[in-house]
Image: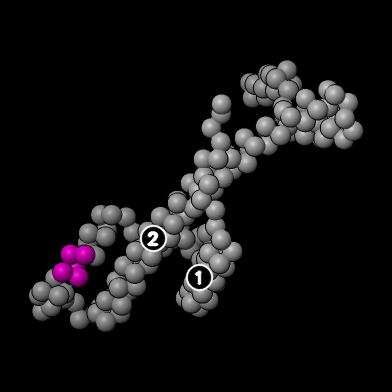
Amino acid sequence: MPFDNLNNNHYTQAEKTAVVEAISTLETVLAGRFKNLSPEERKRYGSINEQNKLIVNKVLDYRKNQSNLSSPDVDWEEFQNDYDSRSFLQETIAKLQNLISGLDNNKILHDFDNYQASLTDYGYSQYKAGTKIAGFETKVTEISQFFSRTATANNTTAQNLKTEE
């Protein structure tokens, strides 16, 4: 017997509404802070790598512990604000990525359950089509278009290989 119903944990309407409202709230709160960067700007400014983050952290450490060694040409209040914002955003991104990962895993299980149930229904429809009960032949024909034929797939693969050579 195949595994089915891998995820029987379904969302209530209240939970769905709460999630949609929470996301809307996030979008509203954050929208004014977003900056659109062109691909060139993203490449130009990029993200500092781990080595450069160590430099920033060391400069901040010196600023906090030996401020007399800090350059007077740096706006240290802005430096601290940038650092705090960056830390907040990094923590927020990590939390959102964890949520996305959990949601994606949950969706995969629901997709699998739907697909397995659909295959079961298709098999039942094939059986019923064999009994000539009205409607099942049409249903089987319409669903069968979504299954690839092995010979066709092999021919397409062979043609693709010839094209690539």
Would residue 163 be seen by someone viewing this image from the given angle?
no
Q: Nearer the viewer, mark 1 or mark 2?
A: 1
Amino acid type at circle 2 is Lys
Front position in the image: 76 or 89 = 89
* Place of residue 45 in the rendered image (x, y in percent of width and height, measured from the top left): 41, 63
Residue receiving disc 1? 22
Number of marks: 2
The kind of secondary structure element at disc 2 is helix
Mark closer to the chain start, 1 or 2: 1
- Could one spot residue 98 in this view of the protein? yes
Q: Position of residue 157 (x, y in %)?
A: 67, 22
- Where on the picture, by quarter, is residue 113? top right
For the residues bearing labels 1 and 2, Cβ distance under 8 angstroms: no
Q: Main secondary structure of the magenta part?
A: helix
Left or right of 127, for residue 40:
left
User: In the rendered image of this protein, does residue 94 appear above or below residue 138?
Assistant: below
Quadrant that contains the N terminus: top right
Q: Position of residue 118 (x, y in %)?
A: 68, 37
Q: Residue at x 78, y 26 (%)?
A: 126
Q: Amino acid at mark 1?
A: Ala
* Magenta stretch, residue numbers: 57-61
Dot 1: few (<14), some (14–19), or many (≥20) neighbours within 10 Å?
few
Residue 146 part of the magenta segment: no
Q: Which mark is residue 95?
A: 2
Would you say 65 lies left or right of 34 here? left
- The way the protein has been coloured in the rendering is one colour
Nearest the eye: 126 or 74: 126
Quadrant including the C terminus: top right
